[in-house]
């Protein structure tokens, strides 16, 4: 019995090497292109709420909270970035935001079967609320619409 089981495992392992479409690997992952990521980053920047208040607790043109920045910079740069560094260095801010936008847009493209508009909606909602859904009314719905509009403008430029 053990020999039979080993033979089945070995056969399956070899067949997945020869015929990868029959392997038990995860569903194909969609990866956002550089153009899509750049459009998402710019759309998020353009749609960022303008509070009109200095020292409002949000940093950079993307209006990121310090506690959010801490995790994002550790994830993307393998080191923490202070809010001041993030605020004063637009290149650094764009690098961190691009990293997170790539991750989230790729995840949403996979989740939506490569429906780009739905993926952008999901990312915009997540950016504002921490959830991919639930932005169908009020301020968050308006924000998502803005992001999608800016995203489409950016994509049409490329």
Image (spheres, helix red, strand yellow):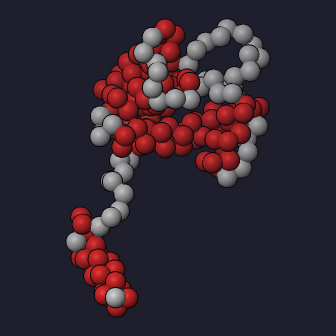
Q: Position of residue 156 (x, y in %)?
A: 30, 26
Q: Is 101 or 95 nearer to us in this picture? A: 101
The residue at 29%/81% (across/down) is 8
The residue at 47%/21% (across/down) is 134
The residue at 57%/36% (across/down) is 97
Q: Is residue 69 left or right of residue 11?
A: right
Q: Is residue 51 left or right of residue 125?
A: right
- Is residue 60 in sight in this rendering? no
Q: Quadrant of the C terminus?
A: top left
The residue at 71%/39% (across/down) is 70
Q: Is residue 57 above or below residue 27?
A: above
Q: Position of residue 106 (x, y in %)?
A: 41, 43
User: Residue placed farthest to the bottom in the image?
Assistant: 3
Q: Quadrant of the N terminus?
A: bottom left
- Residue 90: which quarter of the image? top right
- Residue 33: which quarter of the image? top left
Q: Position of residue 21 (x, y in %)?
A: 24, 64
- Is residue 18 in sight in this rendering? yes
Q: Is residue 111 above or below residue 134?
A: below
- Residue 25: which quarter of the image? bottom left
Q: Is 12 or 82 nearer to us in this picture? A: 12
Q: Is 87 or 21 nearer to us in this picture? A: 21
Q: Is residue 142 above or below residue 125?
A: above
């Amino acid at each position: 019995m053990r020999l039979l089981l080993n033979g089945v495992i070995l056969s399956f392992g070899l067949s997945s090497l020869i015929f990868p479409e029959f392997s038990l690997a995860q569903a194909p992952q969609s990866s956002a292109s550089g153009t899509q990521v750049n459009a998402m980053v710019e759309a998020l920047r353009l749609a960022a709420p303008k509070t009109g208040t200095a020292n409002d607790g949000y940093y950079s043109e993307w209006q990121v909270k310090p506690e959010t920045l801490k995790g994002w910079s550790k994830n993307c740069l393998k080191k923490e970035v202070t809010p001041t560094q993030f605020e004063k260095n637009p290149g650094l801010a764009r690098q961190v935001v691009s990293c997170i936008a790539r991750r989230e847009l790729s995840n949403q493209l996979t989740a939506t079967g490569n429906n780009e508009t739905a993926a952008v909606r999901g990312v915009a909602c997540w950016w504002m609320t921490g959830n991919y859904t639930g932005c169908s009314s009020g301020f968050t719905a308006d924000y998502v619409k803005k992001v999608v509009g800016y995203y489409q403008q950016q994509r049409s430029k490329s």
